[in-house]
Structures are given as C-alpha cells and as structure tokens.
Image (cartoon, helix red, strand yellow):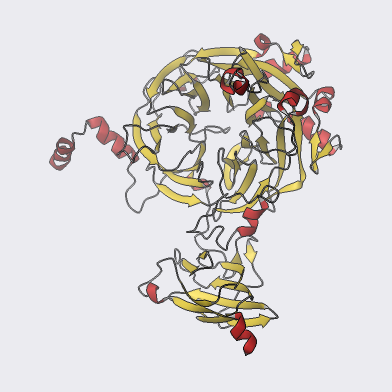
Amino acid sequence: MPALQEVMRQRELTPDDVLAAAKTYVPTGKHDEAIIFASGGHSGQMFMIGVPSMRLLRTIAVFTPEPWQGWGYGVGNEILEAGNAKDQELTWADTHHPALSETGGDYDGEWCFINDKANARVAVIDLRDFETKQIIKNPISMSDHGGTFVTPDTDYVIEGGQYATPLGWEYAPMQDYEEKYRGMVTFWKFDRDRGRIDPDQSFAIELPPYWQDLMDAGKKASAGWLFGNSINTEMAVGTLEEGGQSFEAGVSQRDMDYLHVMNMAKIIELYKAGKHEPINGFPVIRLQTLIDEGVLFFVGEPKSPHGVDITPDGKFIVVSGKLDPHVTIYGFENIQKAIADKKFTSNDQYGVPVLDFDACKVAQVEVGLGPLHTQFDDKGYAYTSLFLEPAVARWTLGGDFGDLNPEPDWTLVGKTNVHYNVGHLLTYGGDTVNPKGKFLVAMNKWSIDRFFPTGPLLPQNFQLIDITETGETMPLLYDMPIGFGEPHYAQMIEASKLKPWKVYPEVGWNPHKQAVDPNHTKSGKERIERKGDEVHVHMTVVRSHFAPEHIEVNQGDTVVWHVTSVERAQDATHGLAIPAYNMNLSIEPGEYVQIRFVADKAGTFPFYCSEFCSALHLEMMGYLRVKPAAVAQSQ
C-alpha cells in the first residue's frame, strides 16, 4: 500500500509500530471488547477505559464531588455525607482497589466496589447505570489499604487495614503501641438483592499491630479461606525525631514478615455465634478468640511483601517481597497439612501460631528486582510487576497445561520493559477463576519521556502489552497518559458481561431506589406548591425547555425541586445549573432527581440546561426569583 508506506516514511514508523497500532485501533462506531475499571487515585473517583483502544470512556463519581454528574452538587449529597468521619466532612479520597462482583469466582458484571485508603471507606457502584449507591465509613479504622476484595459469590466485601491504630478512632501514645495499637480486617456483608452493604450483618476481626496489607479470598480449592500479607512485624514506631530510626528503616529490619492465613468460613461462624465485642458500636472478634478457636495462622514471607495473589485454581498463593527478587509460592494443601500436623515453628508474641515456612512453600521463582503484584492468564503463565527494573516478568505455574505451556514448572520465561516504575498490573480477568489472557496493562507510576512534558507534574502511564503469544514475546502496544494521581489498581472484564441501561427503564426513575419514584412529575402535571415555608417545584425537562420556567420564592424558604426527564431517546441528557446556589444536575433520559436547598440569597437567578442537548440548547433556561424577606413580609 503506497499511501501507508508513505505515512510510515514521513512519521518514521517501523512495521512493529504499525502492527501495534492495528492491534489497538477500534474503528469509529465499533466498541472495545473489554472494559477496565480503574481506581482514580487522589481524584476519589473511578475510570472506565476501553481495551484495546485505551480510550477513557467515563469517570465514575464516587467519594468526591464531581460537577458534570452533579455528584455532591445537589445529587448524591446524602450518600457522600454518610461517608463523613464523625462531624468532619471529607471532600477528597485516595481510591485504591476496585473489585468487580463475582459469581462462582468469575466477574458477573453487576456491581463494583472500591475503597478509600485515606479514610477507610467503601463504596458500592451499580453497573447498570455506573452510579455510586452507597458509601460506608469504617467505624473502627482510620485508613485502609487491603480493600476491597470480594468472596467468590460476593457474599462479603473484604476491607483490610494497613497502619495499626487503636481500634475505634481512639488516642494512645506510641509507647503503648504493642498493647493498644491493633490491625484489623472488616467483613462487609453484601445484600445482592438490595444492592447494598448491610452494616448490621457486618463485623471485623482484631489482629496484631502489624501493618496488614493486601488480601485475597480463596477460590475453588481454597474457598472459605482468606490470605493477607503484612509489613512492620518489627512493630517499629518511628524514632527519627529522637535520633533513632525512621519508619522506612525500622519496618524493614527482619528477613521475614507474616502471611496471614485465616479460616474465613469459621470466622463467619464465630460472628454468627455471637463471639464478638463492640468497639465503637461495631462487632469485633477479638484476637484472643481467633487464637483460641484456631482460625488464624501466620507463615513467614520474604521481607516487605506487597502482593498476595491466588492462582485461578485456588491451589497456590503467590507472594512478592519488595526487597526480595523472588516470588514465593505457597501450596494450599501444604498449609492445610502443616496446620493439621501442627508444624509450628513458634508463636508470635501475641500467641498466633507460626507455620513452618518450608512445609508451606512449594517453590520460589527469581523474577527480578522489586516484585510487587501477580496476575494470571489462560495458558498457565503468571505475570509479576517489577518496580525497580522496571519490567513485567512472565513465569510458568506448576501444573499440567499440556501444549498450552510446554515450559518446565515454576520457571521464569521472559520480561518486557515498561516505562517506568510499574506498580500494579492487570490481565484480562487475571484475578478470577477464568482468566482470558490476551491483554496485560502495566500501571506505571512515572512517565518521564513518554509524553509532552506538562510541567514538573507529569501524567502516569498505563501501558498495554500483548500477551497472546507463548514464550518470551510480549510486545508493548500502547501508552495511555493518566492525568490524575495516583491510579492504583484496576480490573478488566469482557464488555459483553456488562448490561448497562441505555435509558432508565421508565419515566420517573429514581437511580438511588432503582424504581419509579412516587414524587416524579408527569407531563401536564407541572406545578409549584407551597407547604408552609417549603416550596415544592414539580418540573419536567425535555428538548428544549423546562416546565415551569418561572419560579418565585421568598428568601428563607426551603425549596424542594422535583425534576423529571421525560426524554426516551438515548443520550438525550439535560442539566440544571442554578447560579449562586452551587447546584448542577445531570438528568439522564427517564431520570427523576430531587434537590433541596434554602433560598437564603435574594435576587434573580437564571437557571439553564448545562448539557448541550439540541440546536435550541441556549434557549433552554428559566428564572428563579428569590424575593427579599423584607419585601415578602410587607406584602
């Protein structure tokens, strides 16, 4: 093709460049085959990204106000307020670990959960309309990192902690660290019929004051168990100010930290049997109870571990230590046998049995410098991110994969360099019982020379890698700049598993009830009603007008504005922006929205449609007139 060859010459493209472009190009009007749900980091939100195009499709508003969707600007205010810490309003978040709901250990495309590390919050997102339905603030923990992870049928959403604190948001001096500081894991019961976490059926467990990190629920062979790693088993308290060690140095002294092995099925039975105590009004199973009941065990793991990942068959647990060049593979059967045979090398200082490392270990694979996280494919390969090299390592799992994977067991196969300092990585369904392979995304923390410099603050970089071929070949296909800090983890699901609504099912649909709201406004029934000092505005919106268009209230009135979109055409979205009152709504086809505010500012306020909807979009407006109190009283 002469034209193609000329473009290649002008742009100095190689055949590999063109092949990579062809593998990622999705023509206009066609859709991506997979969808990434990625944490939005310090934005407090989530991102939807198409694969293989790597196009950003949507920001999902979660923990922080988002004006385009009106989240926190009239809509979702009560949900956001439910996540506040005591009387402190929280307007930022650090989203870390999204978790797609699962059935039988595989993504089902119905729900998504994500945690806020900064404030120990968990959110529930409905994947029919991609809106946040619930935010829960952990009542015993100030921050978390090891959340959210779901059990194979999404019975529970697991929220692990990180930095030990006195449980229940209490104060204690650092000299009381070993006695009064504790770790925790919270088990949030998910009611799938309601689509909500049920706090009344949820509980936590108390753990030693190590810094628990990531968690992974067992599946298939290991179903009913929970695994989590930890750092700072040294219980360093940071004495830099007194001329001693910093936390950085203090938490990295020991050669081994502890893999936490928890019999989750029996822990749930303990909760149901009432073997818990309230902390800040929340049921917590105490550490001594876990020990007495034989449901908590430790196994040594290489120092400063970060990733803990269970293979698709549930038979092996893979742990990476940031300061060790190996991944360590533990066998679930080995662990069970060690427990049954009481192969304990010791107890920790709190009395938790420590299983014999060699009895539980199956293999170690030297993968490279700074291993962090591992994902899997459908060909018997595992993939581990290497923060320090930086690269992605491919290695073989033990087991019989036949012609799919002729390499010897537990063997490093090859690496692909990434740019730069990769943290998490994800493969297509790579943490489920049914991984797809084909694509891998390296979530890189630095980008340096990858994109046009945007000043001292640079974007981060998601790099798409082709893992369809066996062996060493893993070509890099695409660089995607992420202009938000700091996306942390993501999951990738087949687009065909998602069944989003194109318009709401019926006119008057309340997205937070997922039903028609009895207060919605029907066409021809638009009106303004006064009830004492409350003024109820019953409004409809349609291209290209509001009804009613003129609203007059008295200063000091409470305005309850009921807005119903009577549109039924896909993408016929309207907005309602009210100046000076900090209100902006996004009103999708069929949606009912209610906002409430006190009209405390007198004046004339033109409201308008903030979403371009038609040729006469600019004419879609009205007036809110707030009569000064003195004038209203004189009339």
Q: Position of residue 55 (x, y in %)?
A: 39, 46
Q: Choose between 590 and 554: the one closer to the eye.
A: 554
Determine the residue positioned at 49% across, 71% down.
Answer: 567
Image mark count: 0
Determine the residue positioned at 70% across, 80% down.
Answer: 532
Q: Position of residue 102 (x, y in %)?
A: 61, 41
Q: Position of residue 295 (x, y in %)?
A: 78, 25
Q: Residue furthest bottom?
A: 635
| Quadrant of the snapshot with the N terminus | top left
Q: Position of residue 54 (x, y in %)?
A: 39, 42
Residue 195 seen in the current view: no
Rendered image quadrant of residue 398: top right
Rendered image quadrant of residue 362: top right
Residue 178 seen in the current view: yes
| Quadrant of the snapshot with the C terminus | bottom right
Q: Choose between 41 and 240: the one closer to the eye.
A: 240
Determine the residue positioned at 50% across, 46% down.
Answer: 43
In the image: residue 164, left or right of residue 36: right
In the image: residue 524, left or right of residue 11: right
Q: Is residue 234 above or below residue 431?
A: above
Q: Residue furthest right?
A: 274
Q: Residue furthest front?
A: 242
Determine the residue positioned at 73% across, 24% down.
Answer: 175
